Amino acid sequence: MTSVTVRVPAKVNLQLSVGPRRDDGYHDLVNVFHAVSLFDEVTASDEPAPREASGGPPVAVTVEGESSGQVPLDGSNLAVRAALALAVRAGRPPDVRLRIRKAIPVAGGMAGGSADAAATLVACDALWGLGAAQDDLMELAADLGSDVPFALVGGTAVGTGRGEKLSPAPVAGRFHWVFALAEGGLSTADVYAECDRLREATGEQVGWPRVADGLMEALARGDAKALGQMLDNDLQAAALLLCRPLARTLAAGREHGALGALVSGSGPTCAFLADSEDHATSLAASLEAAGVCRRALTAHGPVQGAEVVP
Ligand code: ATP
């Protein structure tokens, strides 16, 4: 049996600026992605599928770890879709078994499903000896979902369009984070719909999305204090309406000295910027002790995108 394991990071949006709803239902975004050290692992192997799986989906998948019971095992699993898409592109049968070990919260606004899809592209490419060009993988990734290309490259990057057109953002040093995991998840589609509804109800004039002044400079200087003040997410108001306890979680983080606090992507995970690794550790302990989250995890960023584990 041959197998390849790829680890892939979660993302937090340092800024998520959501433009008006387009005719195709999507929104133009400016999405400042930042990859953090919470990793899923995807192992692709050529081990034959067990007897009971024959007649099942062409790509066999198992999932373990964080909230794994909520991850679909059928063709709607993004990792399965990624393996099938790569096999079609390569003109070969999709014979593969995928084993996903999750640490990224499911439906948590940290793009865990997209991360698994990116990891699967890299793992299957290596397992099948395809040697696909990075541009080809990026194209397949963009077809799979707006957040998948970023999971391939990682680091910090500005995404435009639906979020899939990326340009890297230089960062000095490392930022320390705490992620407060909530009970249950939020559907990204529901949060966007709530955001549209809120905007319509308030008559808000929605401008063209753009990167906030000073954000790139704060990143390039490695200035956590300045970055903390600039964290901004246009989906936050909608996420807070759909999941009211999050307001308390954000407030608790600020009370315990977070340099910045925001809902990650479509939520419900909350992200807090700390001013050191030690501060992140104590902040996580305080959030758990305050009972405002299911768990609080520390991480740092930026980290590299999907990479084969030697
Ligand atoms: P988004 O990337 O849309 O912001 P998210 O980060 O909030 O999503 P995900 O963990 O990607 O959330 O899960 C969104 C939904 O996708 C889940 O409810 C789950 O049913 C489905 N899903 C499909 N494949 C996967 C996967 N490999 N891991 C996690 N969820 C998956």
Image (spheres, rainbow, N blue to C red):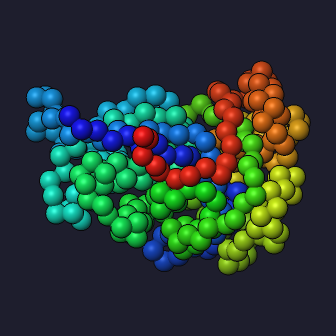
Using the rendered view, name the quadrant where residue 229 is placed: bottom right
Foreground residue among 212 and 306: 306
Residue displayed at 77% across by 64% down: 220
Q: Quadrant of the N terminus?
A: top left
Residue displayed at 53% across by 40% down: 39
Specify whether residue 249 is in view.
yes
**Percent position of residue 26, x then y:** 50, 69
Foreground residue among 228 and 131: 131
Using the rendered view, name the quadrant where residue 210 is placed: bottom right
List the single residue furthest toward the front: 310
**Percent position of residue 254, x then y:** 85, 40
Specify whether residue 109 is in view.
no
Using the rendered view, name the quadrant where residue 48 is placed: top left
Residue displayed at 75% across by 43% down: 176
**Percent position of residue 79, x then y:** 35, 48
- Is the residue 4 above or below the residue 229 in the image? above
- Is the residue 269 above or below the residue 28 in the image? above
Foreground residue among 280 and 262: 280
Residue displayed at 54% across by 46% down: 9
